[in-house]
Amino acid sequence: TLEHDSEWLTLTPTTGAGDQTLTVTYTDNLSTGQRGGNITINGTVETKIVHLVQESSPILEVTPVELNVENEAGSKSVTITSNKNWLVEGDAQWLIIAPTSGSNDDTLVITYTDNTTTVQRVGEITITAGSLNKKVIITQAAKKYLSISTSQVTLPADSGSVQIIIDSNVDWQLSKDA
């Protein structure tokens, strides 16, 4: 006769004689840890035990999944919660990630260089654990700037107007001293 100690196992057949093949059917393991069970085969001469271990369902959580950073160089942390080995890849040369692999829970440090351009930039980091993938999007602000078309204007004696072009990605305010 066959016996088992786990609800997640089904055995076919449960009795027999002579040579046969035992089919063990098991359900999904939805828990965060592995689980085990035993099958006991009771023969008239002796008893044999088969130990079964089922892997846990993979878990991969990443927080935060979006980072908005200033244009100056710096670093931010991202928390990984997992029960598997994982790998990290980035798509931008201005991002340095450490560590690039690990197992279970850990913290990534994402270091970014100065953005010296006047355009914001976006980088993506992908964390992979088995068949699971999570992405972190890093958006870095553009370099702050304020420029004007001219710094000196000579005005004619009669009334009129002149245009000075302001090109900026920051707030500004006008004042006059004349």
Image: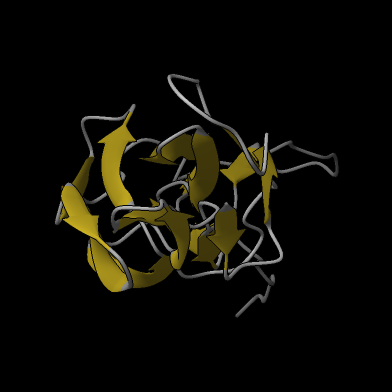
Using the rendered image of the protein, determine whether residue 75 is visible from the camera's viewpoint: yes
Q: Nearer the viewer, residue 135 or 158?
A: 135
Residue 6 coordinates in the image, percent (x, y): 62, 67
* Residue displayed at 49% across by 20% down: 20
Q: Quadrant of the C terminus?
A: bottom right
Q: Quadrant of residue 79?
A: bottom left
- Looking at the image, which residue is at 45% across and 45% down? 152
Q: Residue at x 60, y 80 (%)?
A: 177
Nearer the observer, 178 or 140: 140
Side (left or right) of 3 relative to 50? right
The residue drawn where x is 23% and y is 66% is 109
Residue 137, horizontal then vertical, whole percent: 53, 46
Q: Nearer the viewer, residue 45 or 99?
A: 45
Q: Nearer the viewer, residue 99 or 21?
A: 21
Judge left or right: residue 128 versus residue 14.
Answer: left
Is residue 26 among what the camera can see? no
Q: Is residue 89 above or below residue 27?
A: above
> In the rendered image, which quarter is residue 69 located in?
bottom left
